[in-house]
Amino acid sequence: MNKMTQAAFFGTVIVTGLLAVAPARADRVSVGLGIGNGGGFFALGINGGRGGHARHPGRFHHHDRPMPHPRPFGCLPPPVIIAPPPVVVAPAPVVVVPRGYWQEREERVWIEGCWVETVDAYGRRCKQWQPGRWEVRRIREWVE
């Protein structure tokens, strides 16, 4: 017996059992069908009643005796509702703009002479002396 046949068989047995055990009332019509396999579940329900409201709200008397309200069959506990955390909006950060501006200036810097490793025409590494020189660098400074 594969899973689909097994699910259909047990679903039919459960629905038949529920219909046989539940009290029959003339003022309410309910039909339900649920089919499930390993990965999904399909449910269909029909309710032709008046929303389940009693004809007489509250306690009512029948032949001078209090009649208890029937409990619905197969009551489930109330659902657990988990509210998302509240959205906290932080105030906008205060931006303090200092008074001043950026100024670029050029500066001459002496670079010392050094030995530089190079590759000659035959692919061999050799050292070559590079003499000192002046370089012009741009320096950015904050002026208030």
Image (cartoon, grey):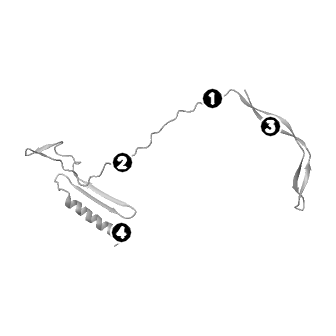
Give the camera-side residue of 82 and 41.
82
Secondary element at tag 2: loop
Label 4 – label 3 distance at C-alpha: 78 Å
Label 1 – label 2 distance at C-alpha: 48 Å
Q: Can you identify the residue that label 4 sits on? A: 3
Q: Can you identify the residue that label 3 sits on? A: 138
Please state the horizontal and vertical placement of residue 117, each as a whole percent of the image.
87, 54
Mark whose residue sits in front, 2 or 4: 2
Q: Residue furthest bottom?
A: 1
Where the C terminus falls, by quadrant?
top right
Nearer the N terminus, badge 1 or badge 4? Answer: 4
Q: Is residue 25 left or right of residue 141?
A: left
Secondary element at tag 1: loop
Secondary element at tag 3: strand
Nearer the N terminus, badge 4 or badge 3? Answer: 4
Mark 3 is surrounded, within 10 Å at the Cα level, by few (under 14), some (14 to 19) or many (20 or more) other residues, namely: few
Residue at left offset 23%, top offset 60% = 18
Q: Label 1 amino acid?
A: Val
Mark 1 in CB contact with mark 2 (< 8 angstroms): no
